[in-house]
Amino acid sequence: MTSGHSGQAQRYIRSIQRTLGRLEDLLREMESQVPELRPPDPRSELLEQVHVAGAMEQRRLFELLDQRSINHTWIGAQVGAEYLELWQAADGRTLYRVTDRAIRELHLGQLASAAAYASLSESSFGDDWQSAEDSAYDRL
């Protein structure tokens, strides 16, 4: 290899090393910004259910708490933490809904959307797997 080619190769290598360093920096930055998902627990699941429902009547929320052996004071704690808000309907019912803070801090809604996408892709994958185009590969 001539010295001209050697110098050019060295420049390419240094350029690749700089680019790789930038990519590693970006990856570290992205990893530090990824929200830490909390492990599922009955309390988070309840807030997720209220979020998916849009709003939940107090009676129904009490039933869900009882099924999980969670004290009804949990509701007050969530209201105090500004994760739940309540209002009185015109017919006198007490309704609860999750707050924007709860959605943001607890990443509510992400599990439901991930499940929806997974179920959509399952049927597409199954259809594609059984397609006539795919059967051509079965004969190879």
Image (tube, grey):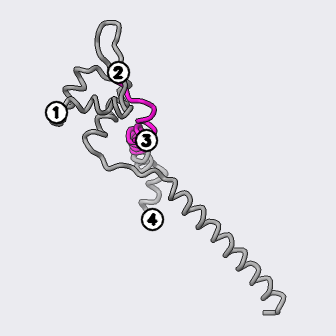
Q: Is residue 100 visible?
A: yes
Q: Residues within 10 Å of mark 1 (few under 14, many from 20)?
A: few
> Does dot 1 land on a helix, a strand or a loop?
helix
Give whichever of discs 4 and 1 has the lower sequence position: 1
Which mark lies nearer to you, 2 or 4?
A: 2
What span is colored magenta in the figure? 96-122
Q: Residue at x 38, y 42 (%)?
A: 111
> Does dot 2 land on a helix, a strand or a loop?
strand
Quadrant containing the C terminus is bottom left
Task: Give, as a three-letter code, the residue at label 2.
Answer: Leu
Res. 3 image quadrant: bottom right
Circles 4 and 1 in contact, beta carbons < 8 Å: no
Q: Residues within 10 Å of mark 3 (few under 14, many from 20)?
A: few
Q: Position of residue 80 (x, y in %)?
A: 34, 31
Magenta run includes residue 100: yes
> In the picture shown, does residue 94 fall above or below 63?
above
Viewer-closest of 76 and 62:
76
Res. 6 image quadrant: bottom right
Q: Residue 105's mark?
A: 3
Q: Mark 2 — residue?
A: 86
Task: Give, as a three-letter code, the residue at label 1.
Answer: Gln
> Does dot 3 land on a helix, a strand or a loop?
helix
Task: Give, as a three-letter code, the residue at label 3.
Answer: Glu
> In the picture shown, does residue 139 fall above or below 4?
above
Gap between marks 3 and 2 measured at Cα: 19 Å
Q: Mark 1 — residue?
A: 67
Q: Residues within 10 Å of mark 4 (few under 14, many from 20)?
A: few
